[in-house]
Image (cartoon, helix red, strand yellow):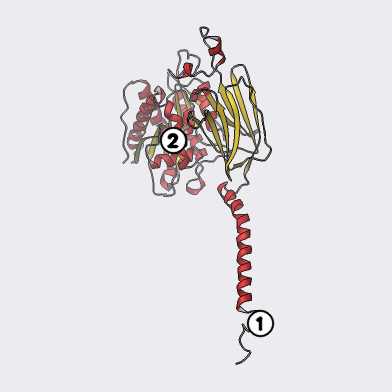
Amino acid sequence: MKGCCPFSKNSRFSPLSVMLEQNSKIILLLFLLSILLPTMSATARSGGKSLNTVRSISYRHTQNREIITLSLQREVSYRARFLDHNPKKKLPYRLFIDLFNTRLPDGIRTSAPPESSCISKIRTAQRNSTTTRIVLDIQNKIFREDYRITQSEDPPEITITLFKKTPSKKMSTASANDRFSEKNNLPKKQPRKTPAKTRGPCVVVIDPGHGGKDPGAIGYRGIQEKDICLSLAKQLYKHINSKQGYKAVLTRNTDIFLSLDDRGAIANKHQADIFVSLHANSHEDHRLTGIETYYLSFASDEAARKVAARENFTSPAEISDLEMIFFDLLQNNKINQSSILAGYVHNAMIEKLANGYGKKVRNLGVKHAPMRVLINTEMPCILIETAFISNPREAKELKTTAFQKTLAASIFNGIENFTNAKKTAFKTTGS
């Protein structure tokens, strides 16, 4: 069999040549993967879209506020936090905002604040391949009510507004120049300056969740949460306005998109006494049913954390960052009153639906979570997950006028009980 071996010395398929050829292919493949993987990973984390871009960062000021504007390609998900100063590391007070699925181009223009500004420096950094961080170095401590962060769709911008302190006439010249003096801030939080409401009807602002380009959860047979929320909100609007001593206002009465911050701003503008945000629950397990009511606080459990993440357009992991905002809010009377309101409304819904509608309703209880839509409101506020749109039976009921009217009547009963009583609400537990 001499000369029959395919790996003879003169053969082009000798063991050495085959090994070299295979190794060269492996090296080429690894090289290509090193180039493609970061791009593929970034695209996957951005939901298949190309990364957003920060176009510019500008600074301007007026007599009573300082404004930083982040110009973007399109709307973006973000988180923000205020950090205390760190003398050991020589770090000042800082307010930072992380922009997700966003890149920071080379040579981006950033307006520098003047030396007299409370902002000593604006810094930028690309934290990883998909997260951009903007940091404002602040001269002195500020609180949550001292700044506001809003986002607009057209043009796509994020605006950070810092409110200047009004110096007292008795303050020295040096103190007057220090508009963010710790001496003025530390002893006591200053309440938001909202015009005193004249006596009149109890104003209830009803917020139909989602809307426009945001359909919310897609339920049984394609039912959209935004449509259910709007239809139910209109029933509640009619019911409340039919009652003496009450007035209802809708944040939206058509299929339009409103940001979570805009909804709270509408309630504040109308000097509402109560804010109710209406939603339909959803879960990958279509067997789940029930009603739960939320008020603003830290997440009560992992399930509440997931619901908050869905309603906040973020992830459960990022909820803990949002919860940091609440450290200076926990003693706020609004939160205490909201928990009482949630108890009254939730109990009224469970009782009314069980008796008046004749349906056994699974009671998921009163819970608390960092719901973004509730943060900026200045009055007792709750968010109701009315039923599971992902469950065939509850989805069908949510579409009926009879169920919506019964649910609206029960929500009003809870509101009426709250306004007529000043006692601690009984918190129901899950069943």
Disc number lying in front (2 or 1): 1
Residue 2 visible? The answer is: yes
**In the image, what residue type sits under mark 2?**
Gln
Examine the rendered structure and indicate whether residue 245 appears above or below residue 212. Answer: above
- The quadrant the C terminus occupies is top left
Q: Dot 1: what SS? A: loop
405 or 274: nearer the viewer: 274
Q: How many marks?
A: 2
**What's the distance in space between the residues labelled 2 and 1, CA to CA?**
82 Å
Q: Is residue 424 left or right of residue 22?
A: left
27 or 334: nearer the viewer: 27
Q: Position of residue 338 (x, y in %)?
A: 39, 27
- Residue 408, image quadrant: top left
**On residue 404, which mark appears?**
2
Examine the rendered structure and indicate whether residue 390 appears above or below residue 211. Answer: below
Residue at the spot of label 1:
11
Write the residue at 65% across / 38% down: 73
Write the residue at 63% across / 40% down: 104
Q: Is residue 314 left or right of residue 430?
A: right
**On residue 171, which mark appears?**
none
Examine the rendered structure and indicate whether residue 207 appears above or below residue 303. Answer: above
**In the image, what residue type sits under mark 1?**
Ser
Q: Position of residue 357 (x, y in %)?
A: 36, 37
Q: Is residue 219 left or right of residue 359?
A: right
214 or 92: nearer the viewer: 92
106 or 262: nearer the viewer: 106
